[in-house]
Amino acid sequence: MKKPVVFCAVNKLAVSEEMFSLLNEKTELIYLDKKVSNNELVDMIGDAEGLLMLGHRIDKRLLDAAPKLKAVSTLSVGFDSFDIEEMKRHGVVGLNTPDVLNDTVADLIVALMFGVGRRICELDNMVRQGQWKNRPFYMNFGHELSHKKLGIIGMGRIGETLARKVIAGFNMKVSYFNRTRKKAVEEELGVNYLTKDDLLKDSEYIVVIAPLTEETRGMIGKREFSLMRNDAIFINAGRGPVVDENALIEALQNKQIFGAGLDVFEKEPISEDHPLTKIPNIILLPHIGSITVECREAMARVAVQGLIDYLNGKTPANLIPFFKE
């Protein structure tokens, strides 16, 4: 039986040696051993039936250039670079990597909550710069996690995992805001549903894990920051454009909130002279929510196996729900 043609547009190190070998074995693999840009992908995708990618735009231009394409598998949970309607018109399905990174991302969020609350990066820099002996101890005050109020915006799988961890580990009181209310989760975990405004007003820690949609783009802006407590700690580990960065910068500079931790930004990567880099009590990470050895191997396994299965006539579990309709 003829092997399906698959274009791998990501570095093989991101796929894992085991999964790259599986691709080589099960498909006729096109791989350039370099980072492939959107323009190069359009020029080179040719007769590929499958595409393994990360961050590339799957739009009309690409789809028109790939008449034999059947499936696109992204090494991520998010698929906001997919033009879903255009993919459907071209008869192309999308696959992602749900569930495998829930613990990994939730762990990082807890680290950001700790890091900002106890000002770990700010005070580490202070010690390295030789300022410890001249700094009064009361200038180092931070905030605890235990028994505090956490508000989660975007109660998907990661949000539920985070809630379980902080309730069990730190006795936090958790509230959430979501497009759809989840009464089963409320009953299981003892979390409370609040309107977005009430959550922002009440929470000491606010975590955004919402996906990027037209509905969520810019949903946290100047008005929303004005509702927060002045001791609030704000974390964004979902998608950068969900938050108005200028409004966040203003809120931090004016001490409307205590601090922030960001793993995502409106435009990535940010430059070294970005205004956010000048603010002391903020932790900035290079979008590493799922970047652990264990998690990336698991994501590669799901993405690669799902693509191979689909191209061989099976319905993989990681088929994005929009393409099941």
Image: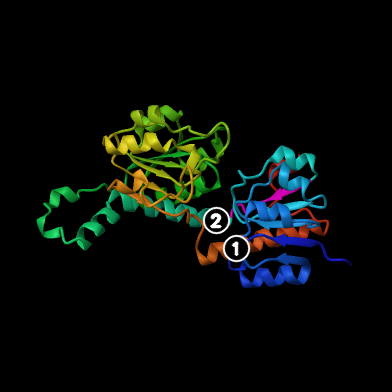
Along the viewing direction, whichever of 191 and 159 lies nearer the viewer:
159
Type of amino acid under label 1: Ala
Q: Height in image: 170 above or below 194?
A: below
**Stretch of the chain drawn in magenta:** 92-99
Cα–Cα span, label 2 and label 1: 8 Å
Residue 214 circle label: none
* Chief SS of the magenta region: loop
Amino acid carrying mark 2 in the image: Leu
Neighbor class of circle 2 (other Cα within 10 Å; few <14, some 14-19, many 20+) is: many
* Left or right: where 111 falls relative to 123: right
Say whether marks 2 and 1 touch (CB < 8 Å): yes
Q: Quadrant of the C terminus?
A: top right
> Residue at label 2?
101
Please tell me which residue is depicted at 32% across the width and 35% down the height of the picture: 251
How far across and how far down the image is residue 128, in percent?
Answer: 22, 63
Q: Residue at x 61, y 52 (%)?
A: 98
In which quadrant of the rendered view does residue 85 lie?
top right
Q: Earlier in the sequence, mark 2 or mark 1?
A: 2
Let me know if residue 231 appears in the view.
Answer: no
Would you name the residue on which mark 1 appears? 298
